[in-house]
Image (cartoon, grey):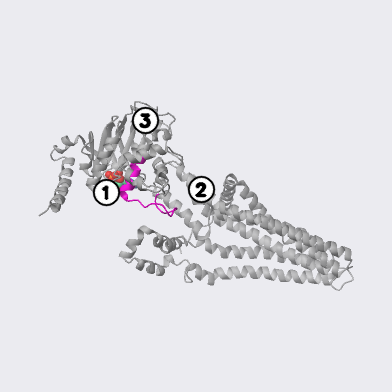
Amino acid sequence: MSEKKGKLPLKDAAAHNRRALSILWKNDRQYVIFLILQGTAAALTPYIPLYFTARLVNELAGSRDPARLWQWLVILLISSSAAALITAAVHRRYWALLEASYTNWNGLLAKKLLDMDFCDVDDPATQALLDQIEQNNSWAGWGFNRAANNFSDLVDAVFRILGAVALSVSLFTMPVPQDSPLAWLNHPGCLAGILGLLLAAVIVSPMLYTKGHSYWAKYDGALGNRVWNFFAYIAMAERQRGTDIRIYQQDEFFRLKADDPACQSFFPNSSIGRAGRGPMGLLMAGSTAVSRVFTGAVYLFVGLKALGGAFGAGSVTQYVGALAGLAEGMTGLLSTLGEMRENAEFLQPAYQFLDTPNNMYQGSLTTEKRSDRKYEIEFRDVSFRYPGTDAWALRHVSMKFRIGERLAVVGENGSGKTTFIKLLCRLYDPTEGEILLNGIDIRKYRYDNYLDLFSVVFQDFRLLAQPLGQNVAAAIEYDRERAAECLKRAGFADRLAELPKGLDTCLYRDFEDDGVEISGGEAQKIALARVLYQDAPFIVLDEPTAALDPEAEAEVYTRFNDIVEDKTAIYISHRLSSCRFCDEIAVFDHGRVVQQGTHDRLVSALGGKYQTLWEAQAQYYQKKEQEAAPI
Ligand code: ADP
């Protein structure tokens, strides 16, 4: 059981809760209104029958006037039914809005993620923060959703108290007649005694409750919950894992996890289970016991006063009910305030995430839409380190791309090729040096405008389980003819003709029964069609063909070379044979450009990196060819 830090100062806790309310209000005003209505209705509805039943019983036990009896009966029935109906209607709407509020909250996180600088999205610390928010919520509803519930509980408690006070004031103001043997109940000491008990009950009971409940806040079951979720649902349900799990009989791990103390959040012997049987259980039981003792004392006091003749029998239920409501309301108020303070700590990671600043400078220059596509990009002595690391991923890279050129970036894994592309697309800014577009630092351009210049197929590109045409256009509304033409140019025409719904065929079966499963090669052709559809002046292919064999990769690159026309194309590959046709090849090694030139020039530079790589890979191809040759 990992202990969390101490509680937040009250001021900070209040500020965190206030901010949660203002976020709620900004996102969905109707929800906040119904949150208040729900709390109010839940608190006041029980008091209506309580009050009118008391009037009815008093009449029954008193003068028994039939007209009055009817009057109270009708009022009781109508008011109780109306209150119950209103409460039900409010409740229904509240629950519908509550469901939507979960989605709204996730939407807020998603929006922030989309607006964030990519370097922050890519930062493991951001992912850890998101995980923490998610785990807090799924573990015990801590965080934003709990804050919303707390507001509703707070409103409930306040109205419960107000209603109770209104219904119980007369208990203390109506005296027992002086000639009654119970007239001593009028003594101020009795009143003080009962108020003292009330005070003790409403302070001690919630105090014990909050103390008991704090075991939940201190108990960090998030890891266990996460492991449980992973092994119980995710790992087993994921199709891609199915083969591994069977071949390597990984069900062994699943059984082992059941014995792992970190995963025993839900087991009787977990620390929270032991706390439940020990101090936490005692505190919770103590809290209930104190409030029950108070209720007993109230029954005695009210019963004796009625016996002494201070009021009718009907009022007994009213006062007992009202005082019980008062204690409940006070307990609710204090325990909700306690919970809000505990929850404030769980709101912190959410705010830390939402407050992540966008540090990348955003310029305002527009990139002119040039019909001659005369764009020139220059890397001028660029060096780059990933945030939080000491190693240079790129070092002193200087390079110019002239329009219409085919540039290849080659090098071994980890030599900095993808990093180079990430900088080119301004997913990160250089740590040193600058990147220029037509002589101007790319930071000075509007980012969305600058991005429009690029179409990229990243190594780990992903298609969506949506219709094929929408995947190609990366949009919901699109030009069907153009999408079909791009698919054709990308070599997907035959497959497209076979698809029953053509461009409307859904990829994968995640959402549609008649979706199609596509192979890695087909996915890659669709990704290429997407690049063509965008018609951007710069096209980047970052080893999108890694899943293909060398011959298939070479074919794709050659076909692509034919269709990129006047655009500038940048190919990244660790297979040198695929890039032979390029005008210029840049060889990366440990983050530096160690050679640059045409294939013929580089391959003849004996002892150079390119030539060494070429020899190593050529040997591999020759060996394969020899093995395949008939004996
Ligand atoms: P390549 O594309 O040539 O395989 P990369 O550009 O992906 O190489 O990686 C260059 C170097 O940067 C490697 O040492 C790699 O470990 C490191 N690197 C890549 N991505 C990150 C990241 N997000 N955070 C920290 N280091 C990274």
Marks 2 and 3, how far apart at CA: 34 Å
Amino acid identity at mark 2: Gly
Quadrant, the C terminus: bottom left
Q: Farthest residue toward the left?
A: 631
Check disc 1 and report the residue beneath it. 548
Q: Nearer the viewer, residue 486 or 131?
A: 486
Residue type for callout 3: Asp
Q: Is residue 294 magenta?
A: no
User: Is residue 161 visible to the viewer in this orientation of the structure?
Assistant: yes
Residue 523 falls within the magenta-colored stretch:
yes
Q: Position of residue 185 (x, y in %)?
A: 81, 69
* Residue 207 quadrant: bottom right
Distance, label 2 to label 1, CA atoms, is 37 Å
Tell me, yes or no, if residue 430 can be seen here.
Answer: no
Residue pointed to by mark 2: 107
Query: Residue 597 in the image: x percent, y percent?
Result: 20, 34
